[in-house]
Image (cartoon, helix red, strand yellow):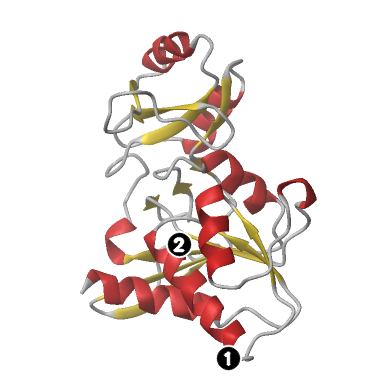
Amino acid sequence: MVEEYKRMAAWAAVEQVRDGMTIGLGGGSTAALALERLGTLLRQGQLRRVVGVPCSQAVARRAAALGMPLVGENEVRPVDVTIDGADEVDPQLNLIKGGGGALLREKIVAQASDRLVIVVDYTKLSPALGTKRSLPVDVVPFGWAIQRAYIRSLGGEATLRTVPEGQPFVTDDGHYVLDCRFGPIVDPEELAGLLAARAGIVEHGLFVGLADEVISAGPDGLRRLSRPGGLGS
């Protein structure tokens, strides 16, 4: 049933796409359903002249297979609307993202977007970021263990993300990812600033004040959560 909730949220977001738009294409299972829907509408001729800006190489491959025109990595441009997923959403529509490891590119595209629409199933809604999910932090490989110690000084416990074979997970940009357990994060903006100020930390998965709308689906149907309304339906 959760898969159906994801589809409901994804399709509702795609309804905002218009002919001629540049669309940010996020990752994750729910955003993937939005991408599939966009591909269907393009093939049927219900959408025209839409160009995608993929947030990862994996998304770019999926979009190309669906026949969606894409901008090149060196041609990223302002985006009309980005449809992306999230690992956790708080009542202020702040997000934790980066479960797939693409948090750096996802944030670049989000900040280049006129509108960021997040699609999730109801299980991703949370009273506070960090309650359900760890926080991904993108770091350069050099000195990564120093960053683990720094995160510990901030009250977190960081684990280097690895692939099944045991080697470090490597992002599209050649970085490592630390998955950091903080527990409920009282002040996401403050923590975001502390992480951003640290040399060697390239980006973090706190998306504070970036989401314009969160579309959530669950047993009670669709909920459209818009700033500043919080988790009101």
- Quadrant into which the N terminus falls: bottom left
Q: Is residue 100 left or right of residue 189?
A: left
Distance from label 1 to label 2 (Cα)? 36 Å
Closer to us: mark 1 or mark 2? 1
Give the position of the C terminus as an image quadrant: bottom left
Name the outermost residue toward the front.
65
What residue type is disc 1 on?
Gln
Residue 117 visible, this orientation:
no
* The image quarter in which residue 220 lies: bottom left
**Closer-to-camera residue (165/180):** 165
Q: Position of residue 19 (x, y in %)?
A: 72, 83
Q: Characterize the local packing of mark 2: few (<14), some (14-19) or many (20 or more) Cα atoms within 10 angstroms.
A: some
Which residue sits at x=56%, y=49%?
57
Which comes before the other along the chain, label 1 or label 2?
A: 1
Please give the label number shown on residue 44.
Answer: 1
**Which amino acid type corresponds to the residue marked 2 in the rendered image?**
Gly
The 10 Å Cα crowd at callout 1, few under 14, some 14 to 19, many 20 or more, is few
Q: Which mark is residue 230?
A: 2
| Residue 85 point in image, percent of width and height | 45, 58
| 77, 148: nearer the viewer | 77
Q: At x 45% / y 40%, what residue is drawn?
A: 101
Do residues under tags 1 and 2 come within 8 Å of each other at their CB atoms? no
Place of residue 91 in the rendered image (x, y in percent of width and height, measured from the top left): 41, 56
Q: Where is 155 relative to 108, above or below?
A: above
